[in-house]
Amino acid sequence: SLEGSAGSYRSVRVGADFSGPLNAEGTALYRFNGYYKDAGSFRDFVSSEGVFFSPVVRLALGKNTTLTLNATYRNERRT
């Protein structure tokens, strides 16, 4: 899915969430979600900006064994 919004004080946010198989057998799966946001304020010299993303990979290693790798990155700047 994709999302987007815009509002007062130059507020903008875009986001994405994707998932699916990485191979035909479905033993390797992925998911990615993230967003970017930027916003001003009714007060002078006040703003915020942020970025976030989190990729996940899941591997079926055997009949009863899976390995899930997950990472997260987040950076926020605020006045």
Image (tube, rainbow, N blue to C red):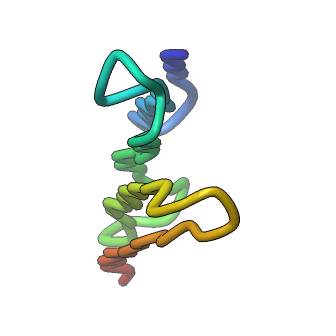
Compared to residue 77, the image places residue 30 above or below, namely above
Q: Which residue is painted at 39% across and 75% down in the image?
A: 72
Q: Which quadrant of the figure contains the C terminus?
A: bottom left
Q: Can you name the residue that lies furthest to the right here?
A: 64
Q: Is 1 placed left or right of 49 in the picture?
A: right
Q: Give residue 42's position: percent from left, percent from top.
A: 54, 54
Outermost residue, front direction?
A: 63
User: In the depicted view, which residue is nearer to us: 48 or 63?
Assistant: 63
Residue 40 spot, x, y in % from top left: 41, 52
At x 48%, y 16%, the residue is 2
Image quarter in which the N terminus is found: top right
Residue 36, x across and y down, in percent: 34, 46
**Residue 75's image quarter?**
bottom left
Residue at 30% over, 30% down:
22
Residue at x 36% of width, y 75% of height? 71
- Residue 78 found in image quarter: bottom left
Q: Nearer the viewer, residue 47 or 56?
A: 56
Q: Position of residue 29 (x, y in %)?
A: 44, 40
Total tally of numbered discs in the picture: 0
Looking at the image, residue 31 lies above or below residue 22: below
